[in-house]
Image: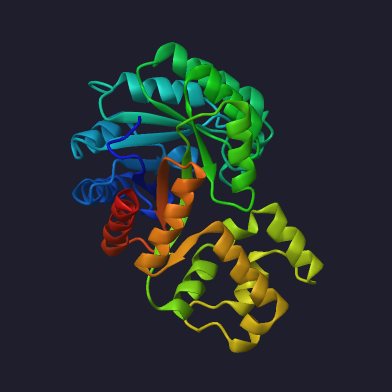
Amino acid sequence: MHGRFSFAGGKATKLSKYGSTSGERIRRAVVSATLCSANKLEYHLIDSEWKWHYLMSHEAQQLLDASPGLTTVLTFSSRHLNSLRIVRQTVQSLKTGEGLALNLVVGNKAYMTDREARRPPVRTLVDMVKFAKRNFSYVPTFIGTEGLTRKAVELAEQYDLVPMLLLDKTLEKSMKVIRDYSGMKRVALYVPYLVSSNYPRLLHDILYRLSGYILRRTWVQKEMRRLGYEPTLRTLGAVIQEKKPLSPRLMSSELGIFLKKAASTLTIYGTPDAVAERMRFLKNLGITTVFGFPIKENEQQIVTFGECVRKTNIS
């Protein structure tokens, strides 16, 4: 899992964004994988989020068959009920492990039943890591660090996994934990991104489309309360509307200034040159693989992301 380049790129795909039926989701996932290959990305990360969006065994094989040379990374949440059985059924049913990688995470409570959300994150993650390495040691594996960086890094060191961070205000602190604990040479990062030269529309699209993602950050919730706002979708919906531009009054207010800062902290956005420059910063920080989640899902975003990764490798 070292990749063909010193700084590897991959696209993150959220199946929940790909339609209400499994047929529609796999059809669009195959198109996405084809675009990843065509634009020289090394990875295609599949994030099912909800348990009922996991790929069925034949769908996983279909996705692998459609993208030779591309590594498909399947994400599994340790707190989902029967998650170990789902991992076993999926991996064992594949013709080979070639072109496959796993991403093991505790998962977000927003995509769980109440019972699943009460399951202990550390214990279930440890169990899943041990299970995967015992049964599928030949499959390269990433481990999500959200909410338990130190434990995830410990497991990564012990079981030869690649830690995957989220772009957040704690990124540099998390990288220090990794360096101090193990000096790992492989670190992945999950990054929502949007490439465009239309700056006002850019910021609007990020705040509108990623409002739930942004509001899940504890530091965002605390700061909004300090400013006198409840950190809810209703609050943001009142000031950020789909078909109306961001008002100058909002953007000059304390809330607007903070939301702009939050968007800059949690995402990469701007012109292609600005995005490539941010990637160079991440590479210098020690990130070796970046998984970009396109805030707007279209072919041009994937094409431009691939170009930015290649620019980072030749700079």
The N terminus lies in which quarter of the figure?
top left
Residue drawn at 59 percent across, 47 percent down: 171
Where residue 220 sits, quadrant-wise, is bottom right
Q: Choose between 107 and 99: the one closer to the eye.
A: 99
> Is 116 situated left or right of 306 in this image?
right
Residue drawn at 58 percent across, 59 percent down: 265
- Residue 157 vs 4, above or below: the answer is above
- Residue 122 vs 22, above or below: the answer is above
Residue drawn at 30 percent across, 33 percent down: 60
- Residue 30 vs 278, above or below: the answer is above
Q: Choose between 70 and 78: the one closer to the eye.
A: 70
Residue drawn at 59 percent across, 43 percent down: 108
Q: Position of residue 236 (x, y in %)?
A: 63, 71
Point out the residue furthest to the bottom here: 248
> Is 7 situated left or right of 223 in this image?
left
> Is 28 situated left or right of 173 in this image?
left
